[in-house]
Amino acid sequence: MNGRRTALKRLRALAWSAMAGAAGLRPVEAATAQSRSQDSADEVVDRWFGVRADGKANDREALQKAVDSSVGKTLVITGPSRIDAAGVHLRSRSHVRFVDGASIKLLPHRETNYEILRIWDVQHVVVERPRLDGSKDLNSAKGGEWGMGISIAGSSDVTILSPYTIDCWGDGIYISNSFHGGLPYSSDLRIMNHYASGCRRQGTSIISGKNVLFDHPVWENIAGTPPAAGLDIEPNFNTDVLENIRIVDPVTRDCQIGILVWLAALPGVQDKHVTISIEGHHDEGSRDAAFSVSRLKTEGRVVTGSISSRRPTWVHPKRHAFVNSDWDSAGPRVDVSDSTIIR
């Protein structure tokens, strides 16, 4: 038992050092995460449940067993795991920590629809430093756009620190209402230092959410299927919610569109109030627009609120810096202030 306890202490120290140092957390965030780490009395390690983490074996079933067996504890992911496209479900009160060098990468597949990590209809979830690879080059599918790194649906009180999502068939992170009768919208989500690259559709999609924070994300090299945005805020139905969406100091680079807000599907029977705030957006080289707010026709329905971008810097946009098209003046007020455009 002493050897196991020593190993756990080393894993805890390694995980904390990697998270707070390499991930570049700011002091307040680091202190919060450290406090959570120190408050966790119990840790379990993925290998105890049969996870091989050798970069070859299919570890999906063992990882799922580890998640299911660690509710209320901290599950430490220790190495490079490969899984099939069925993905892994997190549970309420899951706390998962990836140490330096740990990752989950999809095995060769032919799937247009997958979620590597599924956060559906749950509460009180923390995920630290997940490194997820959708293996785009190993996917033999010919179409589709729904392969997600992390999918959050109908869930609340979710914190994700420094997620790294690359080469997904669809989006790095996808946020929506429940698919199975859970919460009507996802709420109280905090995603810090998200990095997405090489995804085909979006770095992140926000379909529906309330009290959603993205702090210091980087979304780059997004191409393959429209709209190919770093961030796409785009409801699917009138039942979706976009309230208190905050995007702080985002970087978009080499995307079709840096940040897109597209509200065509939102008007309907339910009155809607939209609040989206973007602070300090830095875009480089987006092919169509650095920032686009488009496609709202209220047709007598009520859609109010505000959409703002403050202090953006848009560098070398290939076509447009800012687009505001097909927009009903009866809809939310759109405000861009203190912008810098470098041609």
Image (cartoon, helix red, strand yellow):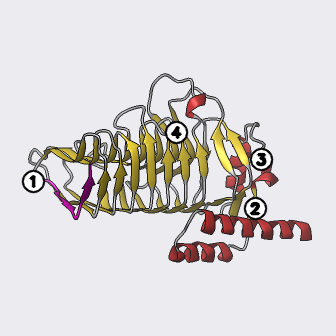
Q: For the point 50% across and 30% down, which residue is it?
A: 112
Residue beneath disc 2: 44
Q: Magenta segment range?
A: 330-343
Q: Nearer the viewer, residue 146 or 101?
A: 101
Q: Tell me which amino acid carries mark 1.
A: Ala
Say which of 258 and 74 sits in front. 258
62 is higher (above) or lower (below) than 100: above
Q: Amino acid at mark 3?
A: Val
Expressed as whole percent of the image width and height from the top left, the position of residue 6 reads 85, 70
User: In terms of secondary structure, where does tag 1 sit?
Assistant: loop
Please tell me which of labels 1 and 4 falls first in the chain: 4
Query: For the residue labelled by badge 4, is the local secondary structure a helix, a strand or a loop?
Result: loop
Q: Quadrant of the N terminus?
A: bottom right
Q: Of helix, strand and loop, which one carries label 2? A: strand
* Badge nearest the viewer, 1 or 4: 4
Q: Amino acid at mark 4?
A: Cys
Amino acid on which disc 2 is placed: Val
| Residue carrying label 4 | 168
